[in-house]
Amino acid sequence: MDNYSLKAVPEMPEKLEIPNGSMGPNDKDVMAQLNISHPLQASELKYPAQQLSLNSQIIRNVHGIGAQLKYMMEINAASKVGRLPFLPSSNLSRDVLLGNDEMITPFDIYGSSEFSEKMVQPHAVMEKKLGIL
């Protein structure tokens, strides 16, 4: 049996390039050079796409290609449904199709629109969208 393991290899540069001027703990140039990421970060970013692909393959194997195409078309149509540009969309129909409607994630708590710091004027957003400016 093969032993597959994930080894964390830090990606630290040999020498940090310090920019001219004052340097503080939040200096973007120096922080960007460190580029340290958790080994599971890449896997977690790919997880939703991998789950969609797996569910699609299972549906194809069990019910045939017609059911798979219908499932993918429903997800595509549900993804395109939106509201006016200044109103956030919950994407509930897409979450129901993907099975994420009963799952509570940090985005559900911290990513809601009521905690958003973005304040827009609806008339200005619609004028920009329609090119009336």
Image (cartoon, rainbow, N blue to C red):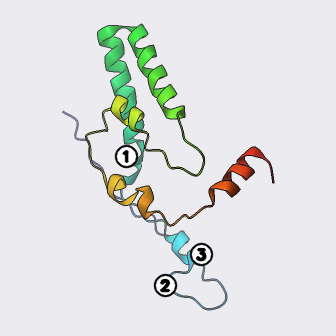
Q: Is residue 100 visible in this depiction of the protein?
A: yes
Q: How far apart are the two marked residues, 1 and 3, measured between alpha carbons?
A: 26 Å
70 or 129: nearer the eye?
Answer: 129
Q: Earlier in the sequence, mark 1 or mark 2?
A: 2
Numbered mark located on residue 29 in the image: 3
Q: Amino acid at mark 1?
A: Ser
**For the view shown, which residue lies furthest in the left direction?**
1
- Residue at 34% of width from left, 32% of height from top? 96
Q: How far apart are the two marked residues, 1 and 2, measured between alpha carbons?
A: 29 Å
Element assignment for label 2: loop
- Residue at 67% of width from left, 87% of height from top? 20
110 or 67: nearer the eye?
Answer: 110
Q: Callout 2: few (<14), some (14-19), or many (20+) C-alpha neighbours within 10 Å?
A: few
Q: Is residue 26 left or right of residue 22?
A: left
Circle 1 is placed at which residue position? Answer: 43
- Residue at 41% of width from left, 42% of height from top? 46
Residue 114 x/y as whole percent: 42, 60
Q: Is residue 48 left or right of residue 17?
A: left
Numbered mark located on residue 25 in the image: 2
Q: Earlier in the sequence, mark 1 or mark 3?
A: 3
Q: Is residue 50 left or right of residue 4?
A: right
For the residues bearing labels 3 and 2, Cβ distance under 8 angstroms: no
Give residue 80's quadrant in the image. top right
Residue 36 x/y as whole percent: 43, 65
Q: Is residue 102 left or right of residue 129?
A: left
Q: How far apart are the two marked residues, 3 and 2, measured between alpha carbons?
A: 11 Å
Q: Is residue 7 visible in this depiction of the protein?
A: no
